Image: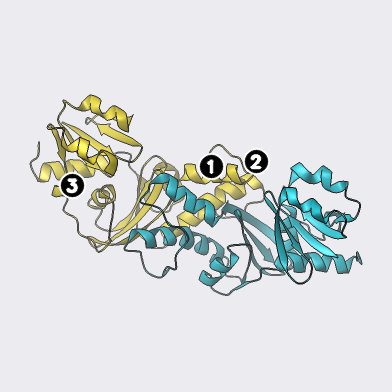
Chain colours: A cyan, B yellow
Amino acid sequence: MILCDIGNSFAKFYDGKKVERLKIDEIFRYADRRVCYINVNERIAKELSSLHKWLDLSPFIDFTTSYEGMGIDRQVLCTLVDDGVVVDAGSAITVDVMESGKHKGGFITPGLRFLLEDFSAISSRLRIAAVESVELDRLPLNTKDAMSYGIIKPLVLAIEQFGKRVYCTGGDGEILANYCANSCYDELMIFKAMMKIVQRNSLC
Amino acid sequence: MILCDIGNSFAKFYDGKKVERLKIDEIFRYADRRVCYINVNERIAKELSSLHKWLDLSPFIDFTTSYEGMGIDRQVLCTLVDDGVVVDAGSAITVDVMESGKHKGGFITPGLRFLLEDFSAISSRLRIAAVESVELDRLPLNTKDAMSYGIIKPLVLAIEQFGKRVYCTGGDGEILANYCANSCYDELMIFKAMMKIVQRNSLC
C-alpha cells in the first residue's frame, strides 16, 4: 500500500521507504496501485473518486475542532500531537496548537519561498536566494541579515509564544525547527499520521 | 519649499499642507520648483542631480550606524527618535531600534500587500482583500482570521520584543500602530524629520 498527500501543486507519495513528489497531473501513473490518500485540492477531487483502488482517508480521521474550514492535512498532522505546536512549512506555513488532545486554533502565513520572492519584487537590492543563517539574539547590521531575521524571527516568536514543544514538518520545516526552542523536525510526519489512521481502522 | 521622499515605485511630495503621491516618471513636473529630497531609487539618481533647483538632503543627515547599506529614508526617520522602535510599513516593512540616541540595528519584512498577494497565489481559498480586524489575544478558529493573525501577530511580537515605544509611519503604519502596545502613528514622520534637517542646516 502507498500513502499519498495531495496538495494544490504537488502530491507526495510514500511507500514506506521513500517520498516521491509528483506534479498533480502526474499522479495518475499510480492509478492502478492501492493508494490511501488525503487531498486538499478541490480541482481533482472528482477525478480521484473515480480511481477505484484509491481510498480517501478523510472519513476515518478522528479529529474534532471548532476551527471552520481546517484543511484535512492540518487535521491529520494534529492527530499525532497531544500537546504542542504543529508547524507545516510548505507553500503556506500553518501553525496549530494542541493542548491536552484538544485543538485550540491556529494561523497561516505565506511560506518562506514566497517571502523571498516578495523581497525580489520590492527591490533588486532585496534579492537573496535562500534564508541565510542568522543570529536571532542580536539585531541585524546589514541588509542580508535584516531580511533573513525579518522572515524568521517574527515567525519563531509567534510559534514559541505558546511555550510548548514544536513539531515541524514540510519543505522548510527543518529550517524553522533549527531556530525554534524545544523543537523537532520530521519529514514523514504526515505519513506517520496517515499510517496510524490506516492501522486503527484496519484499512490495509 | 517642497519636501520629497523618493522610493522605488513612488515619490511623496509635501508642501507643508498635504502629501501628494506621484509615480516616479511624474515627479519631473516639479522640476522648476525648489525641492529638498531624499532618494533610495538608484535608477533616477543621475536625473535628479541634473535638477538644479532640487537639493539632496543626504549629505546633511546627522546619523551614524554600524548597519551597512541602511536606506537613507530609514536613517532620516531614525533621527527623530532617541529611544524607541521605528516602523515604516510600506512595500517593505522596516523596523529599526534606537536606544539612547544610538541605532542598534533593524530588520526588514515584505509589506502587508505582498503577503496578501502571496496568499492569493498559494490558493484561491486564501484570498482576502485586506488584513481584517482580528483579536491577537486568542487563537483564530477560521481561515480568514488565521490569515490576518498570521500576517499581523508575528510582526507585532517582533516589534514589541524590545519593550520600547513604537513609532509607526508608512501606508500600513496605522494598521500596525493599532495592534502594537505603546505605539503611535504619524503619516508625516519622514517629512518632519526632513524639515528638521532643513532647518538645522539653514537650507531654506
The residue that mark 1 highlights is B117
Q: Decide: marks 3, 2 in contact (CB < 8 A)? A: no
- Residue drawn at the location 51% of the way across and 70% of the way down: A179
Q: Tell me the crowding category of disc 2: few under 14, some 14 to 19, or many 20 or more residues within 10 angstroms, Cα based.
A: few
- Residue drawn at the location 35% of the way across and 58% of the way down: A143
Q: Quadrant of the C terminus of chain B?
A: top left
Is A165 above or below relative to B58?
A: below
The residue that mark 3 highlights is B58
- For mark 3, name the chain: B
Q: Earlier in the sequence, mark 3 or mark 2?
A: 3
Residue type, label 2: Ser
User: Would residue B9 appear left or right of B42 to someone viewing this image?
Assistant: right
Instruction: Report, in whole angstroms, how far the alpha carbon at label 3 lies from the one at label 2.
Output: 44 Å
Residue type, label 1: Glu
Residue extending furthest left? B202
The residue that mark 2 highlights is B124
User: Would residue A87 appear left or right of B61 to someone viewing this image?
Assistant: right
Residues flagged by tags 3 and 1 on a common chain: yes
Expressed as whole percent of the image width and height from the top left, the position of residue B111 reads 44, 46
Secondary structure type for disc 3: helix
